[in-house]
Structures are given as structure tokens and as C-alpha cells.
Image (cartoon, coloured by chain):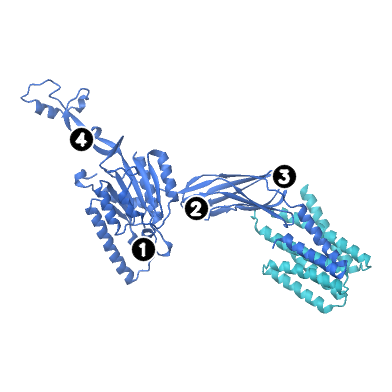
């Protein structure tokens, strides 16, 4: 019950009793209560006129890094003898130092500043409001107000560094990059020999071929010359597809493979963008989260923001992947899927491959992950063996369909686990052998 | 500091009421009032914040009943006044628990206790007038008044020194 109402009821009771019994002494007992009530009423805040500023030491950090939040409250109204102010922080963030709630006396025109430190796991956190509640000196009358503020903190997954990811999509873009484009021009790798053209540098002339071709022929000097041609290297379209399906990622005890997949996506996107590729991201969990293709640092920010917000969810959209938008993932571009994989994914991936996409799958090993969290009983061992066989069979089927699969045990860091696999990676023979 | 003040007010509240009842020859009721005071203190120890509201209600009711039973009004007024202060301090303790340890808790406590001390002094003055009017200004009453006055003046001096 409201305190002022409680005191008021007692006073009313005493007044009624005094009237009923015609005893004035009862009024004397009520007098201190009345004075108490009036004193509280006199100091009751009429309006909360506060100016609230919040400053975050960083708005984008990597997981686990502390962020200092500084809040300054300026009182533009009358003196507030007891002001409780609380900066509402998201439940995902943990407080490591200080407190977001304070009780202060704030005089007219005075400012009060407090700081606290938070840290949190990957995610996007909004600082939307600051709650203030002022009261009279006796705490009888309280006035609360929520001040809406702006502020966002993004905690990004910390990406491991991967030097190079060998991909070779059929289609490349016009800009120079690192993917052999199967087109003659400026480059490093030998591509072929063609007739000399005016303007070719002398060191490009293939003297051996020119000499062999000119034997027994009468021709002008230009007609008997041949130049070496090199393979152009260009950037490619890369689409990362991150599997956020609940049924593939969540295991007993609330443990999830998804965080490992997100870290892998961050590392891969960092590497692809560093190589100059045009990168797009699709996260499919409870809904489809698109990050349209783009280049450079801006795209890296977009991708990191999307990864920070990525959540596991349940939907059946994976089946729709076979109808990928060509705007998002141009046909014959490279698709990198990060998924623990299930048997039903085989058909979808094979269809993608049939549409001309180069598909590379990074698959966190769900069998090893689940086995590591279960007690090693004979039944678990047997089940793990069966699951392992099924998974190996699935991976072989995918590989037979021309899909490159790199499986990694999440007990090891992503970069360390996949580096050897990337090094010995084989590209299908019809695409040019080892890369 | 608040806790000490709270315990003192509970003791003074139930003590004043019990003393007044005992003076009027109602020893049985005085004993029950003291038992209630002990329960209130246990409630405080067990952090039962709602007990203070019942304490205030019971104190005011006992004071009203005392008037009916011809108990000296000064003690009754003091009993209800200190019960009000105990109720206030219980809530104030709760409000302080919302604060961070780095806040100026000592300042808040000091200011609040000063207010309550002056309030208690004013209330007792009123009660004194009531007792003088009924010619019941006894030695025990003078001791209580002196104690509360000393407490209020100490708080006032501390506040003045700090505000300088």
C-alpha cells in the first residue's frame, strides 16, 4: 500500500474515533501523523525535469571486452532530496564493476555522474531507458519517470585469422583479385600463347614459339611473333550461409554449436573481404537474416553486426535455399555453408551444386561435440559410432557431388582446426587441379 | 546508524506505552506491549519489513485504548510518535538498500535522522504541553524529553558542521 495512503487512513481512523467517542485526546495522537503527512506533502516532487546523457567507452567490442558506461544526470527542476536513478541494462550483459542504480540528493541545477562497467557475450544490446524515481524526504510521495535514451552496444564475435581460403568459383567479377578467372590478360600464371599484338612488351614475346612458327614461312616480323598470355586474377562473389537451425545446433543441457559456427563465419568473412571478394551473408534460424553483398570495411561492419545479432531458431527455410536469389548469390558464384549438417541437407546442397554454385561446407562436428558432453557409457559409445558412420556417409555423398566439405572438431579453435585441411584442399580436376 | 536509531525508536515506542500503562496500574497490558516490542525487534532481525506497519497500527490503537483507560496521554503520544519514526526508519532502510555503496549514504542518513530528531522533539514538546495541561509532567517524562532533545541537538550540530 502507498505509504501516504496508509498514514492518511490511520489519521482518518483517529478522527472518526475522536468524533465517535467525543474525546479530543485522540486528535492529539493524530497531530504528529498529520504533521508528518504535511511535511512529506510539502517536499513531494511535482515534476521530474532531468537531463540524462549516457556515454559508452566503446559501441563495438569483441566478446568479453569491458565497456565503461558513464551516465550524467542534470537536475533542471527543483531540488530532489531522494532520487533513485537506474540505467536499465540488457539482461545479457553482466556487470563487472560499479552499479547502474544510485540513490542521490540532487539539488537544483546540480549534475551527478556515475559509471559502471559491463561485459557480455556476442549480441546487440540496446540502452533504451533510464528510470528515475524521486521522493519527498520522508519517502511518502514518489514520482517516477522513464527517460528514453539512445545507445547501442554491439559485441562482435572475435574472428580468428585465416591467411587464405582456396576457392575457385566459375564466375568472377571485373575487379582484380586473387581468383584465376580463366581469361587471358595481366596476371602471374601462364594461360596461353597468342599472336603478337602491337603494344605487347618485348618480355611477353614467346621467342621459342615464334622461332618454331616462322621456320619455312615468309611473313612480316609482327606476323611471325607470338606473345605469352597470363591468366587474369579477379575477385569473386562469395555468399556465406550460416545455419542457425535449432535442431542442428542445440544439444542437451542448452549447449550449442552455434557460437562456434558464428566464430567460423566471422573468420571466413574477414578473410574473404580481406582478399577483396564481394561478400554476402545469410543467417537462417527462426527467420532469414540477409546481409546484401558488398565489399570492404563497410561490408565487414555489416556482416559483424548481422553476426552479433544472429540467434538460433526453428524454421524449415533451409529447404528454400535451393531457390536462392541470384541477386544475393549470383549463379556460378561461391557459396560457403557453415552447418553441422543433417541428412536432409544433402538434396538441397546437391541441387545448389547442380545450379552451378561452387559449394564449400564448413561443418562443426556435432558427433564429437555431443559425445564430449555425455558420460562415456557403452551405449553412448555405440550411438556415437553409429552417428559417426552416418555423418561420414553424408560427407562422402556430398564430396561425390562435387561439394567440398571441411569438418572440424569444435574442441579446437576454428583456425587451427581447418588450416591443415585448407592446405591440402583439392579442387575438382575439371576446375584446374590443386589450388 | 539507521539501524541503531530504528532499534532505539522501537524500544522507546513500546517502552513509553508500557510505562504509561504500568503507571496507570495496567501491568498485564504493559507486559503484552513489551512482548509485542520484543516481537517487533525479532521481526526487524528477520527482515520482516511489513511488521513495522502492523507495529505502527498497534501502537496507535494501544495509544487510543490507553486514553480510554485513563493512561497519561503524554506516554501514549510518545509511544505512537516513536512507532511512526520506527515505521519511517524501516522504509528508509529499504530505500538505502537500493543505493550503491559508493553513494553518499552517510549524508543521506545524517539528513534523514536530523529531520526525524527534530520531528520527535516537536512531537514530544506537544506531548509535554498535553501533560502539563493535565499536570502530569513527571520526572521520568523530563528524562525522556532531555534524552530526545540531546539527540536532536547532536544531530543538528553535526548537520551544521557538515554543511559548513
Q: Is mark 2 on a helix, strand or loop?
A: loop
Label 3: chain letter: A
Query: In the image, are marks 3 and 4 on the same chain?
Result: yes
> Which chain corresponds to the colour cyan?
B
Most extreme residue toward the top is: A220
Query: Which of pointers 1 and 4 lies earlier in the amino acid sequence?
Result: 4
Assess whether mark 2 and mark 3 are in contact (beta carbons under 8 angstroms): no
Specify the colour of chain A. Answer: blue
Q: Which of marks 3 and 2 is in front?
A: 3
- Decide if residue A424 is in sight here: no
Q: Is mark 1 on a helix, strand or loop?
A: helix
* Disc 3 packing (10 Å; few <14; some 14–19; many ≥20): some
Query: In the image, are marks 3 and 2 on the same chain?
Result: yes
Q: Distance between the residues labelled 3 and 2?
A: 36 Å
Q: What element carries label 4?
A: strand
Q: How far apart are marks 4 and 2 (CA)?
A: 51 Å
Give the residue pinned by disc 3. A108
Label 2: chain letter: A
**Displayed quadrant of residue A189:** top left
| A94 lies above or below B55 | above
Assess whether mark 4 and mark 3 are in contact (beta carbons under 8 angstroms): no
- The answer to which of B108 and B1 lies nearer the viewer is B108
* Disc 4 packing (10 Å; few <14; some 14–19; many ≥20): some
Label 4: chain letter: A
**Displayed quadrant of residue B86:** bottom right
Give the residue pinned by disc 4. A190
Give the residue pinned by disc 2. A120
Query: Which of pointers 3 and 4 lies earlier in the amino acid sequence?
Result: 3
Amino acid at each position: 500500500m502507498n505509504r501516504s495512503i496508509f498514514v492518511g487512513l490511520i489519521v482518518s481512523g483517529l478522527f472518526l474515533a475522536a468524533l465517535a467517542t467525543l474525546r479530543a485526546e485522540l486528535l492529539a495522537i493524530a497531530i504528529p501523523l498529520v504533521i508528518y503527512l504535511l511535511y512529506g506533502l510539502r517536499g513531494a516532487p511535482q515534476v521530474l525535469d532531468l537531463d540524462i546523457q549516457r556515454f559508452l567507452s566503446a559501441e563495438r567490442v569483441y566478446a568479453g571486452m569491458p565497456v565503461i558506461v558513464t551516465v550524467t544526470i542534470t537536475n533542471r527542476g527543483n531540488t530532489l532530496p531522494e532520487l533513485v536513478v537506474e540505467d536499465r541494462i540488457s539482461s545479457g550483459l553482466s556487470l563487472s564493476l560499479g552499479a547502474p542504480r544510485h540513490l542521490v540528493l540532487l539539488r537544483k541545477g546540480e549534475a551527478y555522474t556515475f559509471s559502471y562497467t559491463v561485459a557480455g557475450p556476442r549480441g546487440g544490446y540496446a540502452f533504451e531507458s533510464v528510470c528515475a524515481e524521486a521522493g519527498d524526504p520522508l519517502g511518502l510521495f514518489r514520482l517516477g519517470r522513464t527517460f528514453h535514451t539512445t545507445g547501442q552496444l554491439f559485441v562482435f564475435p572475435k574472428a580468428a585469422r585465416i591467411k587464405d581460403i582456396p576457392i575457385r568459383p566459375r564466375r568472377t567479377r571485373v575487379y582484380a583479385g586473387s581468383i584465376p578467372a580463366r581469361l587471358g590478360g595481366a596476371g602471374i600464371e601462364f594461360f596461353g600463347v597468342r599472336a603478337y599484338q602491337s603494344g605487347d612488351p618485348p618480355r611477353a614475346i614467346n621467342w621459342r614459339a615464334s622461332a618454331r612458327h616462322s621456320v619455312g614461312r615468309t611473313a612480316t616480323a609482327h606476323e611471325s611473333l607470338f606473345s605469352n598470355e597470363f591468366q587474369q586474377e579477379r575477385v569473386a562473389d562469395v555468399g556465406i550461409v550460416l545455419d542457425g537451425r535449432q535442431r542442428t545446433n542445440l544439444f542437451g543441457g542448452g549447449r550449442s554449436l552455434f557460437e562456434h559456427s558464428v566464430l567460423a563465419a566471422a573468420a571466413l568473412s574477414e578473410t574473404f573481404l580481406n582478399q577483396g571478394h564481394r561478400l554476402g551473408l545469410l543467417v537462417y534460424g527462426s527467420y532469414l537474416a540477409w546481409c546484401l553483398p558488398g565489399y570492404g570495411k563497410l561490408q565487414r561492419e555489416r556482416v559483424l553486426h548481422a553476426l552479433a545479432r544472429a540467434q538460433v531458431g526453428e524454421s524449415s527455410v533451409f529447404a528454400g535455399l535451393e531457390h536462392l536469389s541470384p541477386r544475393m548469390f549470383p549463379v556460378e558464384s561461391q557459396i560457403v555453408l557453415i552447418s553441422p549438417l543433417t541428412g536432409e541437407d544433402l538434396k538441397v546442397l546437391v541441387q545448389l551444386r547442380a545450379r552451378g554454385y561452387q559449394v564449400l561446407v564448413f561443418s562443426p562436428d556435432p558427433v564429437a561435440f555431443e559425445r564430449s558432453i555425455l558420460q562415456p557409457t557403452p551405449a553412448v559409445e555405440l550411438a556415437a559410432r553409429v552417428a559417426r558412420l552416418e555423418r561420414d556417409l553424408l560427407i562422402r555423398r556430398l564430396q561425390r557431388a562435387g561439394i567440398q566439405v571441411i569438418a572440424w572438431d569444435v574442441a579446437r579453435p576454428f583456425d587451427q582446426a581447418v588450416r591443415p585441411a585448407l592446405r591440402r584442399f583439392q579442387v575438382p580436376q575439371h576446375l584446374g587441379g590443386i589450388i | 546508524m539507521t539501524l541503531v536509531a530504528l532499534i532505539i525508536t522501537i524500544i522507546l515506542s513500546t517502552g513509553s506505552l508500557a510505562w504509561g500503562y504500568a503507571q496507570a496500574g495496567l501491568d498485564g497490558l504493559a507486559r503484552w506491549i513489551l512482548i509485542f516490542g520484543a516481537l517487533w525487534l525479532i521481526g526487524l532481525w528477520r527482515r520482516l519489513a511489513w511488521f513495522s506497519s502492523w507495529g505502527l497500527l498497534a501502537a496507535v490503537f494501544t495509544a487510543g485504548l490507553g486514553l480510554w483507560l485513563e493512561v497519561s496521554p503524554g506516554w501514549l503520544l510518545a509511544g505512537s510518535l516513536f512507532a511512526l519514526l520506527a515505521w519511517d526508519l524501516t522504509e528508509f532502510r529499504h530505500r538505502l538498500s537500493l543505493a550503491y555503496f559508493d553513494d553518499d549514504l552517510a549524508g543521506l542518513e545524517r539528513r534523514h535522522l536530523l529531520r526525524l530528531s527534530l520531528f520527535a522533539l516537536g512531537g514530544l514538546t506537544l506531548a509535554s504541553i498535553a501533560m502539563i495541561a493535565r499536570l502530569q509532567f513527571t520526572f521520568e517524562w523530563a528524562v525522556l524529553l532531555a534524552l530526545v532533545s540531546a539527540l536532536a541537538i547532536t544531530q543538528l550540530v553535526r548537520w551544521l558542521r557538515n554543511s559548513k
